[in-house]
């Protein structure tokens, strides 16, 4: 199975990004975490992107705040799917990171999730890998069925409460 790289721009991103690692681990997807900077370690970032496919990665998650160029810098160096996680790290509430991540030029796409959306980034990575892995697809189907069952249970409880009120 291909690995997922989780790259964060700063160790301050870890509390949010750990949720991506936990989600991937729950699906049995191997992952590696690293700290890199599009601005402070551009050579290392470019090298990681260029070697990612050869090193067994199938998807790259990139979490960064403020100018948030990390996802774009990684995407520029690989044809692997890159999923940007804009981080809430400034007075702008993460909107700066969201806009920086989502506004990539034509030809260098970056999928982008919500601000601090590490869980959805991990789930999107699992969905990408599930295109070629039936066991991952089955796990995703089961998780969706569990979510639907939980909603139905809450609906039944609500209707029961309302009818007894």
Image (cartoon, rainbow, N blue to C red):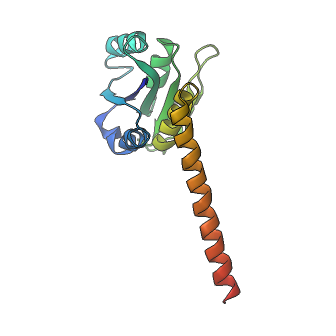
Q: Nearer the viewer, residue 142 or 10?
A: 142
Where does the image place residue 161, in percent across and percent down from the top left? 63, 83
On screen, 126 above or below 109?
Answer: below
Q: Residue at x 66, y 89 (%)?
A: 164
Quadrant in which the C terminus appears = bottom right
Q: Is residue 158 left or right of residue 10?
A: right
Residue 148's spot in the image, x, y percent? 62, 57
Q: Is residue 14 left or right of residue 89?
A: left
Q: Judge left or right: residue 122 versus residue 51.
A: right
Question: In the rendering, at what x and y percent does residue 21 appear?
Answer: 37, 39
Residue 159 vs 86, above or below: the answer is below
The residue located at (44%, 43%) in the rendering is 88
Foreground: 38 or 148?
A: 148
User: Residue at (41%, 9%) from the top-left corner?
Assistant: 50
In terms of image quadrants, where is residue 60?
A: top left
Residue 55: which quarter of the image?
top left
């Amino acid at each position: 199975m291909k690995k997922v790289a989780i790259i964060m721009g700063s160790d301050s991103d870890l509390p949010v990004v750990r949720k991506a690692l936990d989600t991937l681990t729950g699906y049995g997807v191997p992952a590696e975490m690293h700290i890199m900077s599009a601005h402070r370690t551009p050579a290392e970032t470019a090298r990681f992107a260029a070697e990612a496919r050869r090193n067994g990665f199938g998807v790259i998650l990139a979490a960064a705040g403020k100018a948030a160029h990390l996802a774009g810098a990684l995407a520029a160096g690989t044809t692997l799917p890159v999923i940007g996680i804009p981080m809430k790290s400034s007075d702008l509430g993460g909107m700066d990171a969201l806009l920086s991540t989502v506004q990539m030029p034509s030809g260098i796409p970056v999928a982008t999730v919500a601000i601090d959306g590490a869980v959805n980034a991990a789930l999107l990575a699992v969905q990408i890998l599930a295109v070629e892995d039936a066991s991952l697809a089955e796990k995703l189907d089961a998780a969706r069925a569990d979510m639907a069952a939980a909603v139905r249970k809450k609906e039944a409880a609500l209707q029961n409460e309302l009818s007894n009120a």
